[in-house]
Image (cartoon, helix red, strand yellow):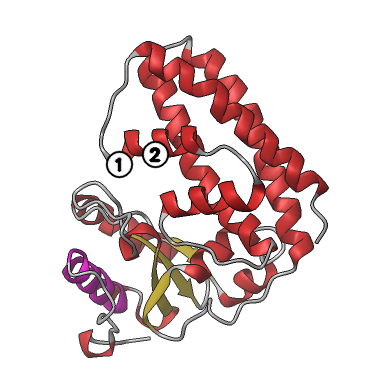
Amino acid sequence: MAENDHNLKLDNMNTEIRDRVKSFAVKLTVDLVNNLESITITGSSLTNDFRAGKSDINSVLVLAKLDLNSLNVLVSMAKAMARKKIAAPLLMTKDYIERSLDVFSIELLDIQLTHETVLGDDPFSSLTFAKTDVRLQCERELKAMLIRLRHGYIASAADKRLLRDILISTVIGTVPLLRAMLWLKDVERPKISQAVLEKAAGEYSIETDSLIRVLKWRNENIHPGKDETINAYEPIYETIEQLSLIVDKLEV
């Protein structure tokens, strides 16, 4: 798909990222030529969760075929992307997306909710998902998260910096799972992370204050003391454990 910047749909882009997305997209249309089918921007750069200078710009490239040449094009762009805080894009084909609706339903649901296709046809808006697939992936991810939390706590040896990073990673990973659980109940899915945590607290009768507190550590660059960091672990673990039990019994 050889395109120029006049084919780019950038009107809905945050002004903070528009120029970076434009230069990234134009470069791709030149270097990937006819293998590039679409460019879609996803995630926090499209919401009020975006933090200028801190948040990455995430994207999905749909290609006609996944080949080494395309990977090498992106390797050649890696340093420039890093300077502009553009994360390495996810590479997919249309066939890959269709065949992944059952195993990557949470990720694709999240992309479907928050995305802007700036070049080519939108590959996500028309996707449909089976609730049984979404419920099963939620259960699997939550139970795996419990394992990582236990292992991470031991591995951190109560190092407050490492434990802080583990807890932040857990909360960030919980947000799309909770969006998926809200989708299972056919209720509105907020795009803002804190709003997701608050909405899920009401819908599933869980405590999310500890998760919101840790989310603020990340968003406001807070580095709590050792005791506060350690004390945050248990309520977060208990919330994830409760969610795993809820979704295990959820009828869809």
Q: Amino acid at mark 2?
A: Leu
Residue drawn at point x = 28 percent, y = 53 percent: 78
* Viewer-side residue, 146 vs 83: 146
Q: Which residues are magenta?
A: 16-30
The extreme bottom residue here reads 6
Any mark on residue 215, and which? 2
- Residue 116, image x, y percentages: 38, 75
Q: Which mark is residue 219?
A: 1
Task: Answer whether residue 138 is magenta in the image.
Answer: no
The relative height of residue 117 versus residue 204 in the rendered view (above or below) is: below
Disc ID at residue 185: none
Look at the numbered disc 1 and give the secondary structure of its residue: helix
Element type at marker 2? helix
Task: Estimate the spatial distance between the alpha carbons at disc 2 and disc 1, rounded to whole Å.
Answer: 6 Å
Near mark 1 (Cα within 10 A), the count class, few <14, some 14-19 or many ≥20, is some
Residue 67 in view of the camera: no
Look at 47% across and 15% down and name the residue there: 156
| Residue 79 vertical position relative to residue 218 in the rendered view, above or below | below
